[in-house]
Amino acid sequence: MTTRNEGALALLETRRTIAAFQMAEPGPGDDEIRRIIAAAVRVPDHGKLAPWRFVLHRGEGRAALDAALAPIYAARFPNAPAPKVEQEAKRFSGVPLTIGVLSTAAEHVKIPVWEQELSAGAAIMNLMLAAHALGYAAQWLSGWCCYDREAAALLGAKPGERFAGLVAIGTPTVPPVDRPRPAYEDVVTEWRA
């Protein structure tokens, strides 16, 4: 017997991205973070490999992280315009919480790496939906620091790991705005023999 859950469907239908610069304190507390992560790990995971892990960037360490990233950014982008440098200077300190989601995907005798990477993406989506369910805004980000080996290591990546994304979470300071979505007819085809 199938049980309908209109509340869960409404949650999916109302999720919107609010930009990190439009977030403020407070962010989730410890118990809420545990709930968010518990939801994030309830994703399809072929082989039960748990091919992801999470790094919390919060509290006083955010400013120190921004300061440690600044010289790496300056070395990689010496001609960056001043507004971009200012934006990068508060990438982490500008939001209450950023959860780094690392893909730990590795070659496996049965489970393709691609499936493991998709599981990390699904974990991010569950994480964002859980934050939304708790009343927070969330934005899935990446950027240079996810792909630069030195910066990624500073953010918590271990050898062989890659950032699937950084999820900024905080209290929204603006109402969510919808964007145009693809029409059903533009993204769905029906297979026929």
Image: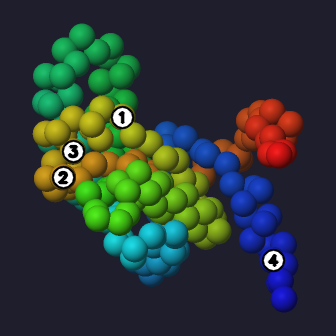
Q: Which residue is mark 2?
A: 160
Kindly identify the amino acid type of the residue bearing the numbered disc 1.
Answer: Gly
Residue 152 - label: 3
Farthest residue to the bottom: give it: 1
Disc 2 from disc 4: Cα separation: 40 Å
Crowd tier of the residue under label 3, counting other residues whose Cα lies within 10 Å: few below 14, some 14–19, many 20 or above: many
Of badges 2 and 4, nearer the viewer stands 2
In this view, the mark in front (1 or 2): 2
- Residue matched to label 1: 143
Q: Amino acid under label 2? A: Gly
Labels 2 and 4: the sequence-earlier one? 4
The mark that comes first in sequence, 1 or 4, is 4
| Mark 3 in CB contact with mark 1 (< 8 angstroms) | no
For label 1, the crowd category at 10 Å Cα-Cα, with few meaning under 14, some 14 to 19 and many 20 or more, is few
Whether the residues at callouts 2 and 4 have beta carbons within 8 Å, the answer is no
Residue of label 4: 5
Quarter the N terminus occupies: bottom right
Residue 16 x/y as whole percent: 67, 49
- Per the model, the C-alpha gap separating discs 1 and 4 is 36 Å
* Residue 51 horizontal/vertical position (percent): 34, 65
Name the residue rendered at 83%, 83% in the picture: 2
